[in-house]
Structures are given as C-alpha cells and as structure tokens.
Image (cartoon, rainbow, N blue to C red):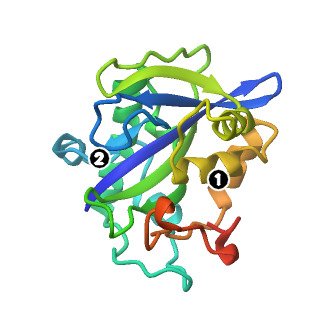
C-alpha cells in the first residue's frame, strides 16, 4: 500500500468549468491508456520537504477529516501529520511534473479519500485534492507517464466515455459525476472545503461487479 495524491485542477469555462485530464501511457503498468487526473505516489523527497506552506496542524486536522463508512470495510488508519504534509507536497509536485503547471500548495483542498481494492496487485491509499488552475495556465504532458493533456468539461468527459471515445476508470468516473453538478469553480471549491469525506475502499474491482453502495452516493 502506497500513499498517493491526485489533483483535480479546475478552471472557468464559458459553459461552466473544465478539469485537466491526462492520458496515461499505454505502456504504464497501472491504468494504461486511461485518462486520469494528475497524481502519483508520495516520494521520499515529499517527506524531506517538511511542513507544507499554509498547512498548519489545525488546517491538517480540518482537511484530513475522512470518516470510515459502515457500508465498506477499511484496512488503513488515518494519516499522520507527517504523512499529510508529504501528501500536500506530492500533490503539487505531481501537477508540476505531469502537466508543467506550478500550483501553490495553499490552494489545494482535500476532496475525497479512495483506497485501491484488496484484490489489486498494486494498491494505493489515495487522497484526491481539488485546486484552481493558475490564470492563463496551459498543460503539457510529460510524454513519459502521460502522453496527452486536455481540458474538458466533466459532463463532456462522461459523454465521451459512454460513447467509447474516452477510457476512464471507476474512481475517475465517480469524481467526474460529482464535478458535473457544479456550474463554476468557486462553487466547487466552496463545497470541497466543507463537504463530508468518507473513505472509500471497494471490496472488489468494478469489472468484478463493484458499484458504490447507494447509501454512499453523494456522501463521500
């Protein structure tokens, strides 16, 4: 199990908002060819970076507030202060490395907490953040882990997936469904800062029949 950070970068668009998505390399051992949000595992350098700017102990306690659901079993304890700072550093670093966009760690807001099913050979304890894109920022895929970078409205991404034109994995689909409900960036960010966070650890892969329990829809 590796700690990981994923960032949903959002920007204003005439039709509402857009999110940044990257296509993973077909040679990747994890989610090859899928369109995902920037992110990856926490590295030693993220721990060495020390406290994250703008993240004091009270803010970490407020942001890392995931609850364990009755509906799904969870095998991971809450993160420590040290892990939380490393996750924030990892989030900003991954955005910079994978899309060539520099973001201020202080602008990140924790949105959700998903853990890879126990049936997977590669398991990640992933914290999803949301952050506004810097004004005028353009994305450039790193051409190593990711081959394409695109800004797309959440609903449009879901429509492309339904039409077979976009490869998505289950957690990405569920996040896009949540983001599609927001008309602008400010509304999404305000919601993220106060929403409940429920740890989601599927008990099996979606292709093996997993669907989010109905009681958790809209609650995580």
Label 2: few (<14), some (14–19) or many (≥20) C-alpha neighbours in 10 Å: some
In the displayed structure, 74 sits above or below 183; it is below
The circle on residue 192 is 1
Q: In the rendered view, does 7 fall on the left or right side of 182?
A: left
In the displayed structure, 156 sits above or below 149; it is below
In the displayed structure, 157 sits above or below 197; it is above
* Residue drawn at the location 54% of the way across and 80% of the way down: 69
Q: Position of residue 104 (x, y in %)?
A: 46, 32
* Residue drawn at the location 63% of the way across and 55% of the way down: 193
Badge nearest the viewer, 2 or 1: 2
In the displayed structure, 151 sits above or below 57; it is above
Give the number of callouts.
2
Residue 122 or 45: which is nearer the viewer? 122
Indicate the quadrant where residue 189 lies.
Answer: top right
Q: Position of residue 175 (x, y in %)?
A: 61, 50
Q: In the rendered view, does 125 fall on the left or right side of 203?
A: left
Label 1: few (<14), some (14–19) or many (≥20) C-alpha neighbours in 10 Å: many
Q: In the rendered view, does 195 fall on the left or right side of 124?
A: right
Indicate the quadrant where residue 53 lies.
Answer: top left
Residue lying farthest bottom? 70
* Residue drawn at the location 37% of the way across and 72% of the way down: 78
Q: Secondary structure at mark 1?
A: helix
Measure the alpha-carbon separation of dots 2 and 1: 22 Å
Residue 39 or 154: which is nearer the viewer? 154
The circle on residue 41 is 2
Residue 52 or 171: which is nearer the viewer? 171
The circle on residue 95 is none
């Amino acid at each position: 199990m590796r700690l990981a950070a994923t960032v949903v970068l959002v920007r204003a668009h005439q039709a509402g908002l857009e999110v940044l998505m990257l296509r993973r390399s077909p040679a990747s051992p994890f989610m090859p060819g899928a369109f995902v949000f920037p992110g990856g595992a926490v590295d030693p350098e993220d721990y060495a970076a020390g406290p994250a700017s703008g993240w004091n102990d009270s803010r970490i306690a407020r942001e890392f507030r995931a609850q364990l659901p009755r509906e799904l079993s969870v095998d991971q304890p809450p993160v420590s202060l040290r892990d939380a700072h490393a996750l924030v550093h990892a989030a900003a670093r991954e955005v910079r490395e994978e899309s060539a966009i520099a973001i201020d760690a202080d602008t990140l807001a924790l949105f959700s907490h998903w853990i890879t099913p126990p049936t997977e050979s590669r398991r990640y304890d992933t914290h999803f953040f949301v952050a506004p894109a810097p004004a005028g920022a353009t994305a450039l895929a790193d051409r190593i882990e990711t081959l394409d970078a695109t800004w797309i409205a959440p609903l449009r991404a879901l429509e492309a997936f339904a039409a077979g034109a976009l490869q998505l994995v289950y957690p990405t689909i569920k996040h896009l469904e949540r983001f599609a409900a927001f008309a602008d960036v400010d509304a999404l960010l305000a919601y993220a800062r106060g929403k409940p966070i429920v740890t989601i650890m599927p008990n099996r892969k979606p292709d093996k029949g997993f669907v989010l329990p109905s009681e958790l829809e809209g609650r995580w």
